[in-house]
Amino acid sequence: MDIQRVSGAVFGAAAADAVGASFEGMMPDDSRMPEMAGGGQFSLAAGEVTDDTLMMLALLETYAEAGCFSRELFFSRMIQTIRVRGKTFGNTTRTLAALVEQGCFPEDAALVVHRLFGSRTNGSVMRTLPIGLTAPSKAAAQAEARRVSSFTHADSEAANACAAVSSAVYSLLHGASKAEVLEAVPAKYLEGELWPSVDALESTRCAFCIFRDAEDYRDAVARACRLGGDTDTIGAVVGGMYGAYQGIDAVPRKWREMLDVKDRLTAAVKKIWG
């Protein structure tokens, strides 16, 4: 296992999330030169991550502790995270966590949330990165991504987006070229106008198109920020892919050192991969 690519993926996702959070909800602006400055609609500190990284980290730490996906452990971590750092979480995740905490089975809670709000959102896509990093094969990554997505998002488009991202991460981690990865990506994620919304298909399309067009990691993050809209999630998804592609050195050291969760990321990576 290439630890440089693993570290690049998790730090790449977290750093892009923290940078992108400054521009979340804004209109497109091609002049943006993003830095890790904090602020934004949640008034974050520089280096403070959002639900994108916190959910990814909850899943990563679940794999680190259990050695596989544990529904009970993951939801325990998710609920605790929302209690302590819930300001960046959306209604879908908050409501689902509250239902599970009250004793509802996750699959049933996901159906309730789906009926209330719809669940073709990118909340499961933002956290799917660790599945591509830990899966034993591309097929296993796709299957696990769909399964884990279903516990919170009762929607096939959300599940398919998770499968596409996890599959790409697996391939990049194991040395596939950008061209090889893009050749395997379903066409719907590479064609059409870019709408940086919270829709699972639309935001995943943005991430894959940025991955295709960007010159390097930092360019990918800048492109995500310039799109406006859900900049932190799109940044986190493409940042994780680019980190898996180029390795940890592609992620600016300054950004890595500023992250408020850098010690947790390092500890989880070390526990899983040594």
Image (cartoon, grey):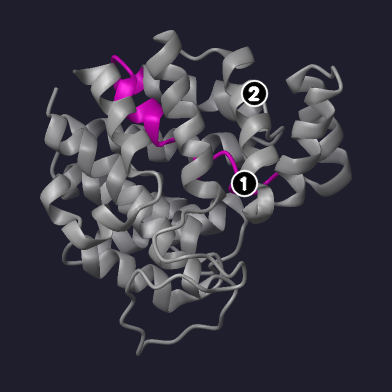
**Residue density around tag 2, few if under 14, some if 14–19, many if 20 or more, within 10 Å:** many
- Residue 66 located left or right of residue 72: left
- Disc 1 versus disc 2: distance between alpha carbons? 15 Å
Residue 273: quadrant of the picture? top left
Identify the residue shown where x is 45% and y is 58%.
Answer: 234
Residue wearing tag 1: 85
Which amino acid, mark 2? Phe
**Dot 2 lies on which element?**
helix
> Which segment is the magenta one?
119-139
Give the left or right position of residue 71, taking residue 260 as reference.
Answer: right
- Above or below for 192 versus 162: below
Identify the disc placed on residue 35. Answer: none
41 versus 141 height, above or below: below
Which residue is drawn at the image coordinates 55% and 65% (left, top)?
230
Residue 75's tag is 2
Earlier residue among tags 1 and 2: 2
Vertical position of residue 30 compared to residue 246: above or below: below
- Is residue 57 within the magenta segment? no
> What secondary structure is the magenta-colored segment mainly?
loop
In magenta stretch: residue 134? yes
Residue lying at 58% horizontally and 70% vertically, measured from the top left: 43
Query: Which element is circle 1 on?
Result: helix
Frontmost of labels 1 and 2 is 1
Q: Which percent across, then down, holds residue 100?
A: 79, 24
> Can residue 172 be seen in the rendering of this structure?
no
